[in-house]
Amino acid sequence: MADAESLKREAGIAACKYVKNGMKLGLGTGSTVKYTIIEIGRMVDEEGLEITGVPTSEATRVLAESVNIPLVEISQVESLDLTIDGADEFDGDFSLIKGGGGALTREKIVANLSKSMIVVADESKKVDVLGGFKLPIEADPLHSDSVIEEINGFCPGEVRIRASGQKNSSGNQPYITDNGGYIIDCEFGPSITNPTDLEKTISDINGVVEVGLFVGICDAVILASSSGVEILVNPDGRLN
Ligand code: 5RP
């Protein structure tokens, strides 16, 4: 049976067949799309592929630069041909939870600018109902307490600020996003049957920067499992 890392690699590389000369590409963030980015770098170096990338995080910028992918800023593009990104969960309607890596805000901006979005994932990301993975929300640090209070009013589980994992004398420090925000992880459990409504409810809270629910954005999932790589095309999507 294939190990998780091999599945990520297979999914990440399989997505590259959608990458064509001249494209402007959104480059996602995470340990699966990392393999896409490395493979695109190889295609640039060895096959003369000409593309321009827009990174969704500083980590992705560093990786893409290290493999010689030409980059521009989000602010320099009006639209993108394709975004390839990972996901923490996807359901049968191609709705996603994203933000495990804390990059959800730029990931959503870039995906929304794109003519299509492909998710690369291993089989652990496929769920019947979203919410087993804690839903990440980016919030303005000055409003994080009031955001948590409001979400506690309807989230059945724990709602807490993500820690950086770096301990200093004053204890765990909050994780800070590339935009200077906090991430609030919300334990809904696998109960998110209406991600559209939940996304709107949370987005309307004062101090919320972005919600890690991506609804109506994903056109296909490239899914690697122990039985091989499968391309799941969203029947309502733009690649159909
Ligand atoms: C980062 C994300 C990632 O795409 C998501 O966390 C999946 O990452 P990985 O491929 O490492 O499991 O949303 O903000």
Image: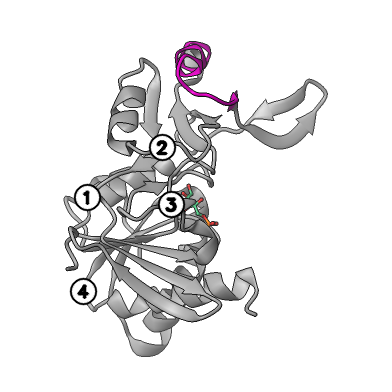
Hey, what amino acid is under mark 4? Gly
Badge 2 element: loop
Marks 4 and 2 sit apart, C-alpha to C-alpha, by 39 Å
Range of magenta residues: 145-160
Marks 3 and 2 sit apart, C-alpha to C-alpha, by 10 Å
Q: Is residue 139 above or below residue 134?
A: above
Hey, what amino acid is under mark 1? Leu
Task: Check disc 1 and report the residue beneath it.
Answer: 113
Label at residue 22:
4
Q: Quadrant of residue 205?
A: top left
Q: Are marks 3 and 4 in contact (CB under 8 Å)?
A: no
Task: Check disc 2 and report the residue beneath it.
Answer: 192
Q: How many marks?
A: 4
Tell me if residue 232 is in the magenta stretch: no
Foreground label between 1 and 3: 3
Q: Is residue 56 above or below residue 219?
A: above
Marks 1 and 2 sit apart, C-alpha to C-alpha, by 26 Å
Q: Quadrant of residue 233?
A: bottom left
Badge 3 element: loop
